[in-house]
Amino acid sequence: MNLIRSIPNLSTIHGPLHLAIGVFDGVHPGHQAVIEHALADARTAGGQAVVVTFDPHPQRVIRPEAAPLLLTCTRHKIDLLRDLGVAHLLLVHFDHEFSRTAPEDFVRALAASSRPLKGIVVGREWTFGRDRAGNVVMLKKLGRELGFTVVTIPPVTFGEQTVSSTAIRQALQNSDLDMASRLLGRPFSVLGVVEHGDHLGAKLGFPTANLDTRCEQFPPDGVYAVTATFGGNVLPGVVNVGVRPTISSGTGTRKIEVHLLDFRGGIYGEEVEVVFHERLRGEEKFDGLESLRAQIRRDIARTREVLSARGWAIPMGA
């Protein structure tokens, strides 16, 4: 993927350009509909499709107290966009200075840097620019003036539920992984880098990988059956999300720790995507390490059952 980080660098991409613009947190089917329309336009009319998105999330700068928890960190978003077939990505750094950009100036900058700008695709309710003063009506007016087309994509629905990042966050908060996955169009997952922890899992006989992740919206604290992808490998595992109350008395930092079944290699520094398949139980405080160890064995056995039932070839040993 060709990743550029400033609007003027659009000029390095051979046009005409078809831009898909949005925050795209989660890259759910509604976002995909916007992006795939731009990709299709580029194939049909000629030229290149470019996804335009922002880092950090604009609300993190404009209203940090009300900013949503991220479903996907920027690195994860980039990977998901690449999987959709996106070849060019403009990642605009969103800071206080950029937030003061008038909507007309933002669009004119895109047009001036494209060689040429052929079309823009956005969601039907998209707003942009200083004070979110820009809207689709303004965008179409600028398109007529500057010579590009504007396509607006209606919301995607699943049954009677409109697909949105907000709805996905709510499903995760409700421990409804099935609904979150349906709305996402894929199983919910997080991307992180394995970092050193306190190695307590190894002392218990169940070594764990501690994930440093930049996403923020997790399912509720508890234990989950998962699969983990890294270095071309896909392995089954058990994840604990929470503060480990047996160890920390409930006062520790919230962590994501994954125990990979039947794996004894070292993966420190590896980038790992953890896919959540089913919640096994809530996080509990046990009366000692032996009780915790016994429960982990039961969690592992249950994980093998869950993943086997979902079509994974999982050995059923302890």
Image: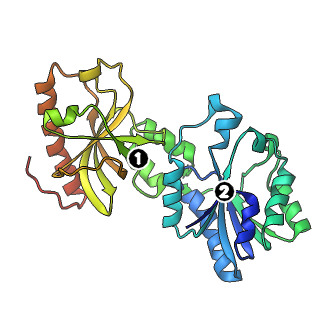
Q: Residue at x 66, y 71 (%)?
A: 49
The number of callouts visible is 2
Pointer 1: what residue?
192
Residue 235 placement (x, y as % from top left): 25, 56
Q: In the picture, residue 64 is in which quadrant? A: top right
Closer-to-camera residue (75/312):
75
Which residue matches tag 2?
5
Label 1 vs label 2, nearer the camera: 2
- Circle on res. 263: none
Q: Quadrant of residue 291?
A: top left
Seen in the picture, residue 120 relative to 167 is either above or below; the reply is below
Packing grade of label 2 (10 A; few <14, some 14-19, many >=20) is some
Please tell me which residue is depicted at 70% across the width and 78% down the height of the picture. 47
Secondary structure at numbered mark 1: strand
- Residue positioned most to the right: 145
**What type is the residue that disc 1 sits on?**
Gly
Q: Where is residue 96 in the image (x, y as percent from the top left)?
A: 74, 38
Distance CA(mark 1)–CA(mark 2): 22 Å
* Image x and y of residue 227, in percent: 29, 53
- Secondary-structure class at tag 2: loop
On screen, 44 above or below 208? below
| Quadrant (top left, top right, bottom left, bottom right) of the N terminus | bottom right
Can the viewer see residue 145? yes
